[in-house]
Image (cartoon, rainbow, N blue to C red):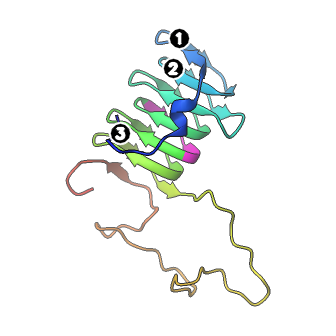
Amino acid sequence: MWGSGSKKKSTKNAKIETLVGRNTEITGDVHFEGGMHVEGTVRGNVHAEDESCVISVSQHGVIEGDVKVPHISLDGTVTGDVYARERVELAPHAKVNGDVYYNLIQMAAGASVNGKMVHKPAEQPLLLEKGQTGTRPGSGGGSGDRSERNDRGDRAGQPGRFEAGKPGS
């Protein structure tokens, strides 16, 4: 589905233990373990209990709240922020109305994010010793506000709308 020759994904190994059916609506926060698949509506925050958890949201699935998981495969709608410690997969019908915090992201043409997309590497932060600066070797270093700008001249990391596969994006 995501192209030929792709590496083995841990999301395929997750056993679905929690299913929200297409005609089901849950109101309240959901905490889950293992795999969760959403075909219906969840009105509340969704949190994974451990690092092996995976959530998939079908084209008809809707989550109205924040999602905090290691892995998410989204083809439906999330109205809230998405925090994925490992991987985010946005399929063609995916819509996020909120910010996306990710380590690794895969976005298909047609998916949209109405908010910030913020890269959060999974690696541990560098520990500084006395007298060192907070820059990585070879990064150019320095201090002050040096926000990078994207192709449109907007500051990187600023709120905005991004749609994959659209001209000018």
Label 2 SS: strand
Label 1 SS: loop
Mark 1 and mark 3 lie on one chain; the one further toward the N terminus is 3
Three-letter amino acid code at the position of disc 3: Trp
Residue 63, compared with residue 82, is above or below; it is above
The residues colored magenta run 77-86
Three-letter amino acid code at the position of disc 2: Thr
Lateral position of residue 145 relative to residue 33, left or right: left
Q: Read off the residue under disc 2.
A: 41
Q: Read off the residue under disc 3.
A: 2
- Which residue is at the front of the view, 132 or 61? 132
Lateral position of residue 99 relative to residue 112, left or right: right
Asked if the residues shown at circle 2 and circle 1 are in contact, with their CB atoms under 8 angstroms apart, the answer is yes
Q: Is residue 102 magenta?
A: no
Q: Read off the residue under disc 1.
A: 24
Q: Main secondary structure of the magenta part?
A: strand
Outermost residue toward the left? Answer: 167
**Residue at (78, 83) in percent of width and height:** 129
The quadrant of the image that shows the C terminus is: bottom left
Mark 3 and mark 2 lie on one chain; the one further toward the N terminus is 3
Lateral position of residue 9 relative to residue 152, left or right: right
Callout 3: 10 Å neighbours few (<14), some, many (20+)?
few
